[in-house]
Amino acid sequence: MKITKEIVESVANLSRIKLDEAATVKMQTELGAVIDYMEILNSLDTKEIEPMSHIFSLNNVMRDDLIKPSIDRQEILSNAPDHTDETFVVPKTVG
Amino acid sequence: MNYEIVMGLEVHVELATKTKIFCSCTTEFGGAPNTHCCPVCTGMPGTLPVFNKKVLEYAVKAGVALNCDITRYNKFDRKNYFYPDLPKAYQISQLYLPFAKNGSIDIKTRSGLEKTIRIHEIHMEEDAGKLIHSPTGNETFTDYNRCGVPLIEIVSEPDFRSAEDVIAYLEKLKTTFEYLGISDCKMQEGSMRADVNLSVRPNGSEKIGTRTEMKNINSFKAIERAIAFESARQIELIENGGEVIQETRRWDDNKGLSISMRSKEDAQDYRYFPEPDIPPINISEELIEEIKNNQPEFASAKVLRYVNDFGITRADAEIIASSKYIAKIFEDTVAICNEPKEVRYWIINQIMYLMNDKGILPEDINLSCEKFAEFIKIATSDRINRPTAKTVFEAMFFASHDFDLEKYIKDNGLEQVDDTDSIREAVLGVLSANPNTVKQYKNGQTKVVGFFVGQVMKATQGKAKPDTVNKIVAEELAKL
Ligand SMILES: [Zn+2]
């Protein structure tokens, strides 16, 4: 699969990353290499292999519905670059 | 040309588990912003979500009640999108293997139309947080208390033809989930939310038109308005030679219109992939059987029982059974006093009236059934008359459980007076105070009897027993 300039721009947009012209060209080559590598896996014959969604053979890992105390708000908020006393602050998402 | 509206619904219902779907934070509604949060539900790196067993139980209960095939081998998928209401930048959901498929539910609209709505699928997912946009500044504030609250999303087939159908369906879902005890389905608190996929087509056409999806509809009233607006918009567009564009529209209930959010061209690319943090979940035959065998008695079965066993009308039975809470008051009170018709009378005429008048929700009624039964006993005796009983009922309805009926009746002197001497005294008083009316009576105007009775009732503050008053007024007039 060829990684076009449009694909790089679309992926950058989905990740909310701004790429300049040079970075776009660089990503086009690097992403292309990653996808080419995956093509090697795709070339294997897996017709007889059952699809797998998890690497561990674990099933039904569940917990009981018991409340545990939440974390102190200041501690949670302190992880963010910007916050008020009560909330996280992000750039405005509507016009 | 006449058009038919075709709609399908996507209904999100918050499950009433104590804790969130993947962490042990409380799901309690309200709470100061970001106080029901931990590293898991705020998406801190390196945390591991663990699935809540109760969510599976509640979800399967919903699937069984909606007659779905339950998926035995379940897994979760990651739905990626970059928006600050989800701090992880992805939502854990189910795309490839929804836990329930191919269901159906029977509804009955207000105008009596009965139909079956097919359920395409139901899946489990986590709710997102709340965003508060600064009205002036360039900031958005985020509150993640709701982030990670368990949801099921019920996707119907396009089987709705009117707002009435939609409302009957949502009411049926609400009642069913209430009886199951898996959600309170409060639209105004956001624990039940409906997205409406709507298209129009000329009457008689088999082809489904291009649809729009309306989001952000927060009440039954808003649903009616949104459907009326959007169908009229699409019809006008087509009539004027235009074309409906497939897009997502946001309903603005204050402005009474829907606004385009995004079209199909810039539709989100969610890049779903299997969720690696949650191992697959097998739903056992035992769990499904146990749930099937322990289903509660739903509204439709209650209606039949109320009609057959208690002899009340179907219409009244439907009103009572439409709420788990009202049905419980009815059944528990009847079990004590064995007066189903009387209990029905006070529920339909007083409780329904007071709820409407004061905006009380069924789940918030604080009425002791022991008290209610004691009241029925008094109301069916000769001790108080109907108008007085209404006053007593209202006092009891708003009081706490230790309300003393006997004391209230005594303190307010509400007991019917059936004492002939004092009633006779009142009658003689009224006759001597109204000589002109007495003269009219003597001249053959017998209709003034009603006036005398009314005056005597007034003089006794409505407490005299009407039969006795009638009798004594007649006796005294005969003596004249
Ligand atoms: Zn949490």
Image: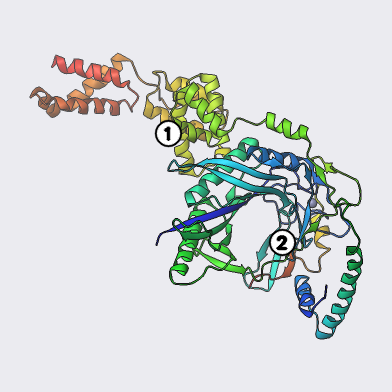
**Display coloring:** rainbow
For this rendering, which residue is in front, B49 or B169?
B169
- Residue B349, label in figure: 1
Image height of B137 relative to B308, above or below: below
Nearer-N-terminus badge (2/1): 2
Relative image position of residue B227 (x, y in whole percent): 50, 57
Residue B110: image x %, image y %?
A: 45, 43
> Which chain is indicated by disc 1?
B
| Position of the C terminus of chain B by quadrant | top left
Same chain for the residues at labels 2 and 1, yes or no? yes
Q: Which mark is residue B85?
A: 2
Residue drawn at x 69%, y 66% is B268
Structural crowding at the residue carrying mark 1, measured as other residues with C-alpha within 10 Å and reported as few (<14), some (14–19) or many (≥20)? few
Q: Nearer the viewer, mark 2 or mark 1?
A: 2
The picture places residue B33, in percent across and down from the top left corner, at 71, 56
Q: Is residue B140 left or right of residue B410?
A: right
Res B406 visible: no
B177 to B87, vertically: above or below: above
